[in-house]
Image (cartoon, rainbow, N blue to C red):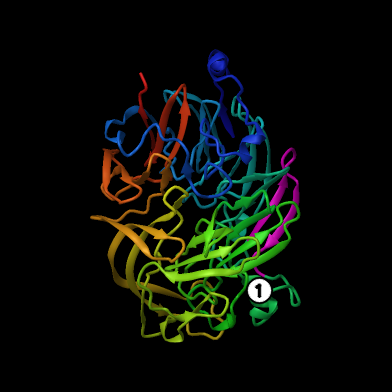
Amino acid sequence: MTTRRFAFILALAAPLFGQVGLDPAKLLEQPTDTWPTYHGDYSGRRFSTLKQINSSNVRTMTLAWMYHASGNPGSIKATPLEINGILYFAAPDHVWAVDARNGREIWTFKWTSKGGTHIGNRGVAVFHDWLYVETPDCHLVSLNIKDGSQRWAVPICDLDQFYYGSLAPTVVHDVLITGVSGDDLDRPGYVSGYNLETGAMKWRFYTVPQKKGDPGSETWPNEEMMKHGGGMTWQPPTYDPALNLLYITTGNPQPVIAHKNREGANLFTACVVALNPDTGKMQWYFQASPHDTHDWDATQVPVLFDADWEGQPRKMLALAARNGYFFVLDRATGKNLLSTPYVKVNWAKGVDKNGSPIPDPAKMPQLDGSLVSPNQGGATNWPPPTFSPQTGLFYVNASRAYSVYYVFDPDANPMGWGGIDEGGATLETMIEAIDYRTGKIRWVHPWQTGSRAGLMSTAGNLLFAGDGSNNVIALDATTGAILWHAGLGSSVSNGPISYELDGEQYVVVGAGETLWAFVMRSK
């Protein structure tokens, strides 16, 4: 590893920045002066209570600064954290600290990988003066946020089995929680809790049963297939402090397309699972895609909110799943409240008594092909949605598409994917505003070209997104009308964030290898 340290810059900036580390109390708040977690807070709503920039004045928002990440790290898919005037963000093998007021680089850290998949990195976690990041070659690394120096590095997965690290860790209490990525080989997924000071593992939850008799083992044909498993944990979890429940979402089962040797629902793949964050013990689960055969992981963001449900206040969780269904659950119990498609789907025959879709065998992959909607890319994918408690709407970047699924390994015990989807077409990409009470689409904003950007809503009645023409966009959160845009030269590659410094509200978004910051000047 090599680290460039700029401690002298921090020393000069100390009177301006004040405290460098993160006060853990910020993790339990919905702060306006900081963005301390992947989603801004534990809920996954990606809603900012700031409203200096609003639907009446956003047209005058202007560029404050831009920062180009050095070292050819690839697109910035990470959500930056903003803490005490400094932005911390990552790309594979890289972490940066940047002045949140002017974009000046403070320090950068580079990890020397010994392999792994470098498809992207979702970001970092911070606790006190410690920063945590995953590396592509299966390490969890802790840095000192003051200068980027390495404290320790511990292995968290087996590179030889084609696991890799890409997601942003999460801190709950005294536990650092993170999952694993990779489904090139048939291997089980898991999420683990680690000691914040040493990196020692405290617990591990496998997303598929490990032996006969384990919960969910009855949904697999035998122990051999449980070891193949699947269920990678690509997405950072969300968390309810009042219930002390951690919500993880899990990937597809293996083999992905050729599925003859894994008869059954294949729990706990393609699920929302509620865990105790202190012990890793499962409290409840809900399966979005029983016996998935289309590569539709359910690793989209489980969004938490408290709102009215049929005249009574309720703690809820909403998920717009890759398979095209929108689900609302009681997050205390996992009870399904609503299951409805938010794009056209043809792969299910309806939903069962628990609210899970019922797969249609005729729409499973076939030797001569099966026309299926949505396609393998899904009705949505990993970029985060947002929920505004102000409008009561859930916003998601969605896609209407279809393709033909083929099995090319008809063996009774296939390995690997065993099939593929081919051809087809994307009919429409758009932002949808979904009423959580009914699942009805309140409004749609179609994109002329496709967009998979993350979203953020604000108390200023704004929705921030990226289009398919390299613009960052602000829309009216109530109507979907475009109010402002700015060209970035590359498509938006992460979820926007917002924070307030010195009385000024900033909006920051990544596009390609560059961070862009926009501001409404108060003076």
Name the side, left or right, on which 326 lies relative to 214.
left
Give coordinates of residue 159: x percent, y percent: 61, 55
Say few, some or many: other residues with alpha carbon within 10 Å of mark 1 (under 14 / 14 to 19 / 20 or more).
Answer: many
Above or below: residue 146 compared with residue 493 = above
Q: What residue is at 54 percent from the left and 63 percent from the top?
A: 183
Could you say which quadrant of the image residue 233 lies in? bottom right
Q: What residue is at 27 percent from the left and 39 percent from the top?
A: 484
Extreme residue toward the front, this view: 311
| Element class at badge 1 | helix
Region of the chain picked out in magenta, as a range: 190-208
Above or below: residue 27 compared with residue 99 = below
**Considering depth in this image, is 410 or 99 the residue closer to the camera?**
99
Name the side, left or right, on which 63 lies relative to 268.
left
Q: Main secondary structure of the magenta part?
A: strand
Q: What residue is at 65 percent from the left and 65 percent from the top?
A: 333
Q: Is residue 269 visible?
A: no
**Considering depth in this image, is 299 or 134 the residue closer to the camera?**
299
Could you say which quadrant of the image residue 370 lies in? bottom left
- Which quadrant is the C terminus positioned in? top left
Mark 1 = which residue?
226
Give coordinates of residue 175: x percent, y percent: 71, 45
Q: What residue is at 62 percent from the left and 71 percent from the top?
A: 228
The type of residue carrying mark 1 is Met
Give coordinates of residue 482: x percent, y percent: 26, 46
Could you say which quadrant of the image residue 401 lies in? bottom left
